[in-house]
Amino acid sequence: MEHLSKRLSLVAEKIPPGSRLLDVGSDHAYLPIYLASQGLIDRAVAGEVVKGPYESACRNVAAHGLQQVISVRLANGLAAMQAEDGITAVSICGMGGRLIADILGAGQAQLATVKTLVLQPNNREDELRQWLVAHQFAIVAETILMENDKYYEIIVAQPGHQMLDAKAYRFGPFLSQAKTAVFKAKWHREYVKLAEALACVPHARTKDRAAITQKMAAIKEMIEDEGK
Ligand code: SAM
């Protein structure tokens, strides 16, 4: 499908085959359209809270002749889901990590039948991981990618218990183990930003400087090659 970005292609790979998917914030409905037209999902609901993107999702689904497989609904978050949909997987992509956590938190009752969450926060990944673990979701896979000079993380979670330390919340339990070149590049960029910020903080502000220095040290330890 011509519109599927690298980011959404990698999200699509994480949706379990045969899922009944709810895609929250479906905008143009690119993700469910791709999955349905490839026969990779059973059916889908494309939920969108804003009228313009909702109408665009409706148009795209109709243009692909997929109205029998994808229901487009104007709804806030998990309210797009109805019991009879039998939703097994939920994707929420392209929003801030805090907003994704708020959407999940506001619709916790609807999550009872959901087996897989595929989440792609644009920021505050640590806060989203904390929400998941605090609400009995275990992180089972993670991916990191770069597209158009931006880094994106994809987090897959399933119902379950998990214990993570501060480092795993910040860097990701799987990403921090894999330490791919993209992961190192993301955190190197973050390190440089912090160093620039530190240079602007007056020496008298010792607490602020210490907080930044601490963050930089944690990044350095994470991305430095072993043995150096
Ligand atoms: N998910 C697509 C993607 O990753 O390319 C679209 C991302 S777009 C930046 C975010 C979309 O989420 C917008 O269309 C916005 O209207 C929608 N959105 C934000 N909050 C929402 C909510 N609570 N419920 C449903 N949709 C929401």
Image (tube, rainbow, N blue to C red):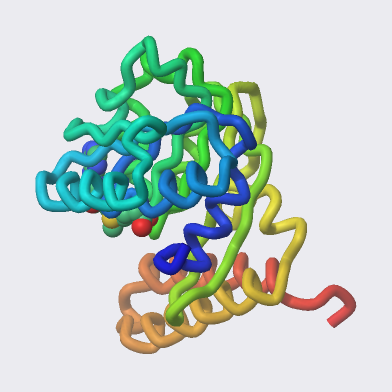
Query: Quick check: 95 left or right of 127?
Result: left
Q: Residue at x 51, y 35 (%)?
A: 117
Query: Quick check: 204 left or right of 145?
Result: left
- Judging depth in this view, the residue of 97 and 63 nearest the camera is 63
For the image, the number of numbered tags is 0
Residue 94 visible somewhere in the drawing:
no
Which quarter of the rendering shows the C terminus?
Answer: bottom right
Q: Residue at x 52, y 41 (%)?
A: 118
Q: Residue at x 51, y 46 (%)?
A: 35
Residue 102 position, x and y percent, is 30, 35
Residue 67 position, x and y percent, is 32, 36
Q: Residue at x 48, y 58 (%)?
A: 8
Residue 122 visible somewhere in the drawing:
yes
**Given the current orientation, which residue lies at the most extreme left position?**
51
Residue 200 position, x and y percent, is 32, 86
> Vertically, is 207 above or below 163?
below
> Vertically, is 161 above or below 144?
above
**Given the current orientation, which residue lies at the most extreme right position?**
227
> Vertically, is 62 above or below 8?
above
**Given the current orientation, which residue lies at the most extreme front position?**
65
Residue 177 position, x and y percent, is 76, 56
Image-quadrant location for residue 100 = top left
Query: Quick check: 63 left or right of 155?
Result: left
> Vertically, is 223 above or below 169?
below
